[in-house]
Amino acid sequence: MAIDVDVDLAVLVGLQASGKTTFYARCLSGRYALVSKDQFPRGARNKQRRQMRRVEEHLVAGRPVAVDNTNPSPQEWGPLVALAHRHGATVTAYWFPPDVTGSLRRNAAREGRDRVPDVGVLATLKRLREPSTADGFDDVREVRFDGRGGFDVRG
């Protein structure tokens, strides 16, 4: 699947274990630089500030960048949208509608740092909101598993 890229900030929005990282690897990597709080050491301080600095570095250099975190609400995505627009970039939300049973099942199969306590997934669900263009996104695309090991992207 080809995704048009100029200077775009892709904000992945969804529960833990919803397929965001796999989607990035299969559909965006090679075209978009990756920024994720998971890239920082577990005990790192000021992860939000570090993330914003890395995103800005890519935007200033004219590189498309994807933010792979849960980004469940305007509190998380709002500063990203504003930063991208300040640098003349478009912002695309990739929305992974919640499949709680599937996320919990996939999460349970994870090991080590990759596994999130179930309570963390459920806490994210409580805050999760579907993004829209009213939130400042230039485009919103819905992403679902296609049942054949890939993704169906609409929007």
Image (tube, grey):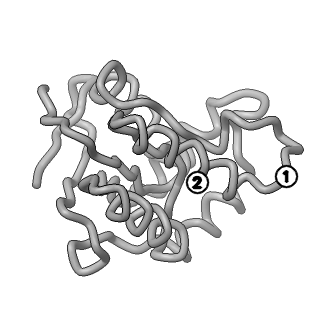
The mark found on residue 45 in the picture is 1
Q: Is residue 39 above or below residue 74?
A: above
Q: Secondary structure at mark 1?
A: loop
Dot in front, 2 or 1:
2
Q: Is residue 143 left or right of residue 68?
A: left
Q: Is residue 118 left or right of residue 56?
A: right
Name, please, the residue furthest toward the top.
30
Q: Is residue 16 left or right of residue 25?
A: right
Residue 143, percent across and down?
25, 47
User: Residue at label 2?
Assistant: 52
Q: Which picture quadrant has residue 60?
A: top left
Compare residues 16 and 66 and report the one nearer the observer.
66
Q: Is residue 107 above or below residue 9?
A: above
Residue drawn 33% across the image and 59% down it:
97
Q: Which picture quadrant has residue 82?
A: bottom left
Residue drawn 65% across the image and 44% down it:
37
Quadrant containing the C terminus is bottom left
**Cα separation between marks 2 and 1:** 13 Å
Residue 107, percent across and down?
60, 40
Quadrant containing the N terminus is top left
Q: Secondary structure at mark 2?
A: helix
